[in-house]
Image (cartoon, grey):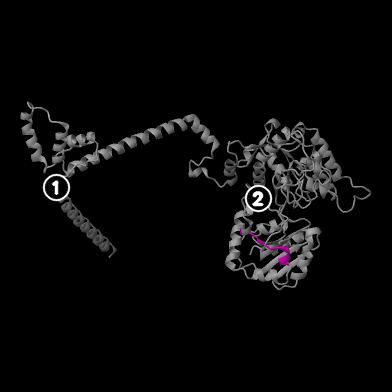
Amino acid sequence: MLKEMQNFNYVTTHNYIISFHRFKNAKFQELLNQPFSQPRCLPLRAQRMLAHSAQPTPKAMPVVLSELRSSKTKKTTKPSSPSSTSTHAHQTLTLPQFLSMARKSSLLKQSLATIVVVLLIYAFLNTFLSPTTTAKLETALPSFSSASSISSDVFASRENQLHFPGKPVKVYLYDLPKRFTYGVIEHHSLARGGRPDDDVSKLKYPGHQHMGEWYLFKDLLKPESERLGSPVQKVLDPEEADFFYVPFFSSLSLIVNTARPASGSDKPVYSDEENQVALIEWLEEQVYWRRNNGRDHVIMASDPNALYKVIDKVKNSVLLVCDFGRLKEDQGSLVKDVIVPYSHRINTYSGDISVEDRNTLLFFMGNRFRKEGGKIRDLLFQLLENEEDVIIKHGTQSRESRRAASRGMHTSKFCLNPAGDTPSACRLFDSIVSLCVPVIVSDSIELPFEDVIDYRKIAIFVESNAALKPEFLVSMLRGIATERILEYQKELNEVKRSFQYGVPNGTVNEIWRQVAQKLPFIKLSINRDRRLVKRDLNVRDCSCLCSNQTGIITSL
């Protein structure tokens, strides 16, 4: 049936076209039989050209033949004047002749225009796309020559987008004395009953929520052949470096000593404060630190209290911090510093995107009593601990607590993330890798990698005052449809790699990408400092951009 309809349509259309052409030709034939007056508006030269170059048609052929017969007799007579020639052309020019000449003139103009365009294109290609220029363009712009060149290594492609000259950001790893790296690990082990080791470099960094400092250090120790896809290049010559990485384990150093000093000693063997001071003394002896006052140095201080004694000595450096909770306005800045995630301690969820096995509406397990902004936790406990489908427990750092937290997050739809002693806490990143939709109650929180991650797609933000209203929080969460929860889980599954330190192209590469983006500003600051003669110390430094102090609104 379909084929018959197609044939019918084709025949009908064909017959219509034939009929239309017959009608058009009949009308056009009437015009051919009528002599056409040459326009008076044409210049005399154009009239002569039309008259002498027009091709005769069958209708005009008798007139032309009669002219040829009479031409023999006209040879002996006086040539006619221009006016008479023009009049004669006016009498013999017909419509087909005029249309033919107009068509030829139009084709001539089109041909000339085409030739001019081709010459211009050739000149452009020859000038701007010579082999030398092409090589420069290939260096300056990212290559998209084939689909096979696009790999799953998204960070390698981001490098081309970030650095237009094509030169990777180069990082030099300082060879610090072992007291600042492996020595910290050794003292942490000894304080917990471990034994001294002849080769401290074999010691393993203990599991800790701030162990990002260990992953960055190990990444720069790898040979370059194992760092393919990294946004930064490790260099062995400090003269080539854009940045200098200082691998002091500042966060682990804070917790080396247990609550009580070692037996038989009134004073702990290890002193974090002494190590902080010793680090600054070592840095100030380095020519590359003195050269730019430490501005091109990168130091990780993810614990809010890390480097607290010497923070003013290193505030010019690029600080890798979890938030600005303990930093003053002239110490921390979104412009020069990088927000990094805590290392998650909860096992990554490996199941399907689903709510079938997530029977708990809202889950929280952590320290109930915190200082400063974290005081909201106790208030939330009072509101939520008696809700039927809500689990909110007090827990401490232990293996059993982590196992219980893993089970709770993997079987809950939403995970509560209130502020800790500072605006951020490790629980946010535990919930992300658990695909448990974070419910963030922290008005001044700063978040990692926010230039590429839209947190509204993976988390729900609730203003603190709203969260403390009776029944507000649970009523809002119960009103979220299953389809919306699945959308949150899908987005969480897409970004969770960015919050996993131990996987290829995970958190480590994301942090290096952020550091690489700071290079233009660091160079601007260095050059500006070199040319300034006098600085008003009462004016706040322009590199300071305060953290979010204005609060947030509920995202639903």
Q: Residues within 10 Å of mark 2 (few under 14, many from 20)?
A: many
Q: Nearer the viewer, residue 287 or 526?
A: 526
**Where the N terminus falls, by quadrant?**
bottom left
Q: Position of residue 264 (x, y in %)?
A: 94, 49
In the structure shown, which secondary structural element does the residue marked by tag 1 occupy?
Answer: loop
Question: On residue 34, which mark appears?
Answer: 1
The answer to whether residue 359 shows anywhere in this view is no
The answer to whether residue 506 shows anywhere in this view is yes
Query: Which residue is at the far top?
Result: 76
Q: Position of residue 324 (x, y in %)?
A: 75, 51
Give the alpha-carbon distance from disc 1 to disc 2, as whole Å.
Answer: 81 Å
Q: Position of residue 238 (x, y in %)?
A: 70, 32
In this picture, residue 47 sits left or right of residue 153: left
Q: Nearer the viewer, residue 184 or 81?
A: 81
Give above or below for 499 relative to 438.
above
Q: Earlier in the sequence, mark 1 or mark 2?
A: 1
For mark 2, what is the residue?
449
**Where the C terminus falls, by quadrant?**
bottom right
Give above or below for 454 relative to 415.
above
Give above or below for 91 relative to 475.
above
* Residues rendered magenta in the picture: 457-467
In the structure shown, which secondary structural element does the residue marked by tag 2 occupy?
Answer: loop
Q: Residues within 10 Å of mark 1 (few under 14, many from 20)?
A: few
Name the mark nearer the viewer: 1 or 2: 1
For the point 79% across and 57% down, the residue is 421
Give above or below for 22 relative to 337.
below
Identified by mark 2, the residue type is Phe
In this picture, residue 347 sits left or right of residue 48: right
Q: Position of residue 196 (x, y in %)?
A: 84, 43
Q: Nearer the viewer, residue 539 or 513?
A: 539
